[in-house]
Amino acid sequence: MKRHVFSTAAFSGALIAAASFATPAVAQERFITIGTGGQTGVYYVVGQSICRLVNRLEDANIKCNAPSTGGSVANINGIKSGELDMGVAQSDVQYQAYNGTGNFEGEPYEELRAVFRVHGEPLTLLARADSGIETLDDLEGKRVNIGNPGSGQRNTMEVVMGAKGWTEDTFSLASQLDAAEQAAALADNNVDAMVYVVGHPNGSIQEATTTVDARLIPLNDEDIQGIVDEYPYYSASVIPGGLYRGNDEDVETFGVAATFVTTAEADEDIIYQTVKAVFDNFDRFKRLHPAFENLNPEEMVTQGLSAPLHEGAARYYREQGWIE
């Protein structure tokens, strides 16, 4: 066996030399974590897409990762606690967090900062065709997945339940599965219906409608209209027909928008570089998911945002002439 012998002095010298070259690069490297959502949802794609573009930056020395999380509320709580640097959140959850309402009742998060709005997200109600569910009111007495605590769908479903005067006891089962689990639960006949606040087309809805006969249920009655009239972050929406098997007609519903948020304490240059990575490569970003296809940069930085813009984002938008 051939043996390689190194002198102690030579080995020590090599370590010192290596350290002298490696230390400056390591010292400049900055790490950021983006909160997303379930792996079958568009939030996960948003975070992964942003990280992909950030990690392509040549001179910023930013390393980005975007793990799956519990969704909107969990992401804002993660930013607040320092576990996350940025995250995706529904526009209604952003409003509630900044103003101290809803899930954040009495505890306004005044350091929350908006970065940009992303895609529209209608509340999507999908029911098994054999469940007898044809309207929202038909959910009473059924097995319904209302979403996991901390998710956007749970938050929006609780608003709907409040408008209807419903509690969890209204349903024969109010399951709390996360987004990645509910399509299988519907296909396996463990629930009659599932709700999802998500951009379309969506992989989870695609999975469910491919494996079992299921129908998108309209959300357009007087109670829903009352929600839209009362809250500034909700608007009427339509899920186009033909996106999913067995659902050829347009379906009226309502919804919010996905937004990208951070904290006032986030480093200004990191936020600047993050938005620069997205908007300098906007055509590439739009190709990363069909829900991004019709995005408009000027609308993304001015609409659907309840918290103030982070200064790093605002600096880039002023350079582009999108804001004053």
Image (tube, helix red, strand yellow):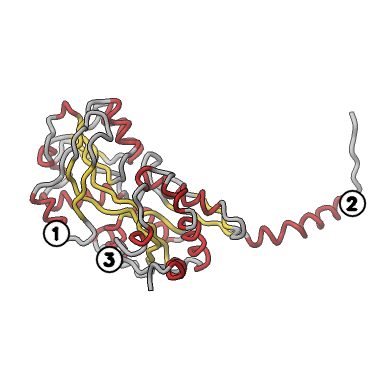
In this rendering, which labeled residue sits more in front, label 3 or label 1? 1
Please report whichever mark, 3 or 1, sits nearer to the chain's N-terminal start.
3
Outermost residue on the bottom side: it is: 324
The disc label shown at residue 229, or none: 1
What element does badge 1 sit on?
helix
| CB under 8 Å between discs 1 and 2 | no
The answer to which image quadrant residue 30 occupies is bottom right
Crowding at mark 2 (Cα within 10 Å: few <14, some 14-19, many 20+): few
Point out residue 85 in the picture as x, y percentages from the top left corner.
46, 59
Residue beneath the point at 10% across and 37% down: 138
Element type at marker 2?
helix
Residue 321: image location, x then y, percent? 41, 69
Q: Disc 2 marks which amino acid?
A: Ala
**Which residue is label 3 attached to?**
100
**Which residue is denoted by mark 2 in the rendering?**
10
C-alpha distance separating marks 2 and 3: 62 Å
Amino acid type at circle 3 is: Gly
Q: Position of residue 76 (x, y in %)?
A: 37, 58
Coordinates of residue 42 in the picture (x, y in percent): 37, 45
Earlier in the chain: of badge 2 and badge 3, it is: 2
Mark 1 or 2, nearer chain start: 2
Q: Is residue 281 left or right of residue 174?
A: right
